[in-house]
Structures are given as structure tokens and as C-alpha cells.
Image: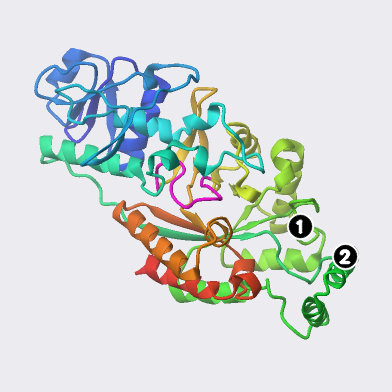
Amino acid sequence: MHSFMLLIYNEKNTSRARYAFDLYFNELLGVSFQITANRDEFIRYEGPKLNYSKQPFGEELFIASTNILFERGITGQKITHSLTPAGHILYPTYHRSSALPFDPFAAGFYLVSRYEEYLPYMKDEYGRFSAKESLAYEKGFLQQPLVNHWARDIARLIGKKHPGFIFPVKKFRFLPTIDVDAAFAYRHKGIFRTAGGYLNSLLTLDFKEIAERTKVNFGWRKDPFDTFQYHRELQKKHQLKVIFFILFADYGLNDKNIPVTNLSFQRLIKSLADYAEIGIHPSFSSDKNPHKLKTEVERLSQVLNWEITKSRQHFLLLNLPSTYRNLINLGITDDYSMGFASQPGFRAGICDSFYFYDLELETKTPLRVHPFTLMDGTLRDYMNISREEAADQIDRLIQTVKQAEGTFISIWHNESLSDAKRWAGWREIYEQMIFTATQ
């Protein structure tokens, strides 16, 4: 065994324990490790090592273990939370010899596996697990990526015990993403929806809307939702990598994009794919209908003539583990839905991507989850804060992710970049976010 290899003593090498160690050491800290249940081998080893058990052997780095990583099945967890001078902690251990006063592997697993979302909870109006149901919201740490902080604490302890042990340098990353719920406000809607739009405006005596719809449909004015060229210019200017998530579904109560057969819509998607990545934005109604989801993924794949591997749920409708199992079954490798609609922050307590752990099956899956930090509609609609407050909130979150050397993923919509009606003035906020994130 090489001296640069971290050796972990752990008596019960469960899939949960392996997942937690892999998350911290491989994913977040970028170091190799091996696990041993052989006490003598561990004591003899002269390289960097960590004892994760109930008792230390000597002067080695020791972190006392709790039980969640050695359990099977989903049971109500009695979570003890406290705010210490060093920050928020879960799963305290009260062991005098432990290098930390809590079990970071248990705490990290609880947050990242989304354990609480498998337990009974009150769903919101769309059937979602809402921010206010979460422990993070209740205890006031939703806007802190605790798992990243705990990883840094572990690295510091190892470095102190083994000064020659070098951790790779991590870098902050920024990934802007755009959801295309409705590619156009007025154009290409089809005769019945266009007529319905006019009728609705007549009934509400909204003559300004009638005039605008008419000008756009006759080609005298650009469609307000057609902000794609504007975004392309921003992308070129700041050399951004971007993902567009396309709602490519049949018309429904919560799914109102352009008809999928519309050639202009298909051309738009192909043009976006020339300079950005494209993912599916599965329809609201597809979450309970795997066949419908399959149809949507295949349709988008046919338009682009390549496999679709990225996804973000429309309405952020995420039910664990069924939503993720459906995506995995269709060959989706990366999901970008992990976050809350009503509050910005870190739903899984982390600002880096991670593999989804299916708690019911007790297995690490091939689906990589990319948590986002904030969404435009959260600030404008759910929180109903001013543009100035939104800019401050965004700035604080970017700095938080920068300090954690994580990835800041934002969600905006082509509609919210229109700078019109309810989104007047929000382009400036978006540009400010990009400037702050790229400095």
C-alpha cells in the first residue's frame, strides 16, 4: 500500500459507509482511499489513516461513528442538531477522543441521500417536498453547503496529523442553465391557442396585449420570449458553458410549450445545440407516467439526432426514488432538479455534484445529481423580493459557493430574460450575476 493512500478502519463495510467515504474522499477531496476491517493492518500502516469506529486504538486520527451507515432500511431518524462555534453539526458523538464532536459521514449521508424525503411529509400544492419541510430550513442552514464545510474540516485534520499529505486544489465553477418552458409568448402556438389568447385578452379588456400579440404574429415585432440571441451574445462575451432544458411535451394544464411538431420550434432547438448543451425538461404529467417520459426523451433525441443524457424536472417535480429511477431507466446520466422552488440554497446540503444513492435499494446508482443554488422564479414569485434584494441574495450565494470551491448552478428562463412586463429590470440582475460569478 502506498503512503499517499488514505487507509480507513471500518469494521462494517456497508454500501452506505462506502458511499459516504467515496463522497468525501474521492468526490470532494480528490484522494484515493482503501477500507480495512483488519485492526493489525491498520495499526501497522505508516501512511495517512483514519479510524472510523466506536473506539480509538492509540494516537491515530479517530472519528467516532454513529449507527446510520450500518443500518438497513428507512427508519425515523432522531436528528440532534446544534450550532457550535465551528458551525452547524448533526449526529453528535460525545466521544472525548473523537477529532470532531459529531459524525460527518453519517450527517453527510443523511443530507445527500435525501433521507428525509423517504419519510412521511406534507406535500405542497404540486405534490413536491417543499423547503419548509426540510431540516435545513427548520434549523437555519439551508443556505450553507455543510457537506463541503465538513469535507474541509476532515481535510484539515488529516493534514494536521500527516503534514506531507497533499490534497488536490479545487476550483469554483459556474454553470448557468436555461429552462425553456415556452419558447415563444405568441408565435407558433397554433390556431386554437392563438384564438384562445385573443379571446382571453378581450374578456379582460387587455387591448395592449391584443396589439402586441398582433404585431408579433404579423412579424412587426420580435416575440418577447425570443431571448436566445441575447443569451448567445452573453455566452460568447463571458465564454460560458450553458445547458438549455427543453419542455418537449404534449399540451397540458402545466405543460404549455410550442407544439413539438412545429418546424420553427425544432429549428430553434437545433440552433441552440450549435453552441450549448441540450437536456430534456420532462413534463409535469410525465412524472407519474414513464411511458410519456420515454416518448418525450425519444422525440427530442430524434430532433437532435443524438442521445439525450441530461434532464431537469418541469416545476422541479421530484419524488424520490421514483423520479430518478424513471430517468435512469431511460439512460439519463445527469439530473439538474435538486433544489427547492420556494427557497434558494442547498437542498442536499452540498454545492457539488454527487451520485444518487437509492435508499430503498441500498445502492449507489449511475445517476449524477447536479444541485442548483437558485432559480429566478424563487426570488421573483415565491419570495416576492425586490430586484435589489434579489441581487444581494445572489451575490451572497455566489460568495458562499466560491468559499466552498463548489459549483454555482443557476436556473433562469428565456421568458425571465425578456426584460418585459413582470420581468422588467431582471436582465440587469442576470448580467450582474454572471459578472459576479465570472470574476
Of tags 1 and 2, the one toward the viewer is 2
**303 to the left or right of 262:** left
Q: Residue at x 60, y 67 (%)?
A: 416
Q: Locate the N terminus by quadrant.
A: top left
Q: Position of residue 107 (x, y in %)?
A: 35, 31
The alpha-carbon separation of the residues under discs 1 and 2 comes to 13 Å
**349 to the left or right of 248:** left
Return the residue at label 2.
Answer: 196
Specify whether residue 308 is in view. Answer: no
**92 to the left or right of 397:** left
Which corner quadrant of the image does residue 353 belong to? top left
Q: Residue at x 26, y 29 (%)?
A: 102
Q: Residue at x 40, y 42 (%)?
A: 349
Return the residue at label 1.
Answer: 256
Which corner quadrant of the image does residue 267 belong to? bottom right
The segment highlighted magenta reads: 338-351
Q: Residue at x 74, y 37 (%)?
A: 289
Q: Is residue 164 above or below residue 360?
A: below
